[in-house]
Amino acid sequence: MATVNVNNRNEYALITGATSGIGYELAKLLAADSYNLILVARNEDRLQEVTDELKTAYGVEVTPIVKDLFMPASAAEIYAQTKDMGINIDVLVNDAGQGEWGPFLETDLNRDIDIIQLNIISLLSLTKFYLKEMQQRNMGRILLLGSEAGTTPMPLLSVYAATKAFVISFGAALSEELRDTDVTVTVLLPGATDTDFFHKAHQEDTVTYREKTLAPPEVVAKDGYNALMNGERKIISGAKTKMHVWMSDLLGTTKAAVNARKLNEPSTEALGEKKPEHAASRKEREYINEETKRSDGDLNQDVN
């Protein structure tokens, strides 16, 4: 039976993108710390599976909310639903995010706009709704998923990288605004991680995915969780990622963009399907492949 942290057993954490990748691992860490969970994702079947898994494993209350965060109204609808439940959100984890690989002139405009909606507008909206209540109570924690990509111009992944630059700047600004309160905002910057991000971004054949070592989501999530609980403003996960960020700052934007492009170009290594080693992210791929037999589009946003 899971150990109960009595300090958190009546508190609630809301996690977007909780069915795979870093979001899934963060949900596990919160549940292990006795937080009750509100999980948000678009695929109802996969969301229910994760809900049942975490309830059984950790003995906490887990509530699924099926919402498509590509839709502008979804953030307000999520907030209204939690208000109707009569609960306060003590921890907000904005994990959901996607990218799209390819030259900007060739990517679909609607897809670019969807990524901005998901990575920026939905994140901003949920933060606005719940931060107001946290400030009124003078308590609360928010974790925003940034990315190493947000620290440098990234040709062939330009819109995604720009959205993550927004997240990094936004989080830093909020932390300063809240410095005299007991509300904290933490930005987590992972490097390339073993999730289903690359599959959904059509980035599977790139040098990064085929030739580089990917960080385990469990390790990234633990770094982010520790920083969140310690009230840190920013955490760069992993020594390699820290080095990449330092090098980008040192080189300047032009040279950093050249280096980033090389990593995003097609690899000469053997191709073919490559699945994540991370079990939950691999499961997410299976749901996507099954669903796309019947319809177009991505199933979920939990790909960071």
Image (cartoon, rainbow, N blue to C red):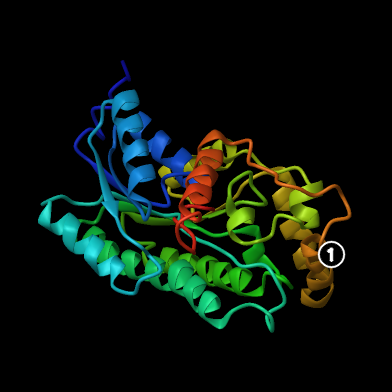
Compared to residue 168, the image places residue 227 above or below, namely above
In depth, the one of 137 and 97 nearer the eye is 97
Q: Position of residue 290 (x, y in %)?
A: 49, 47
Compared to residue 231, the image places residue 105 above or below, namely below
One can see residue 161 in this view:
yes
Q: Residue pushed farthest top?
A: 1
In this rendering, would 177 be left or right of 81?
right
- At 35% from the left edge and 71% from the top edge, which residue is drawn? 71
In this rendering, would 124 be left or right of 163?
left
- At 44% from the left edge and 73% from the top edge, which residue is drawn? 117
In this rendering, would 279 be left or right of 241?
left
In depth, the one of 17 and 272 nearer the eye is 272
In this rendering, would 14 be left or right of 123?
left
Within 10 Å of the Cα at label 1, are there few (<14), some (14-19), or many (20+) other Cα atoms?
A: some
Helix, strand or loop status at disc 1: helix
Q: Position of residue 104 (x, y in %)?
A: 68, 80
Given the image, on which type of amino acid does mark 1 rest? Answer: Lys
Residue linked to disc 1:
262
- At 32% from the left edge and 20% from the top edge, which residue is drawn? 2
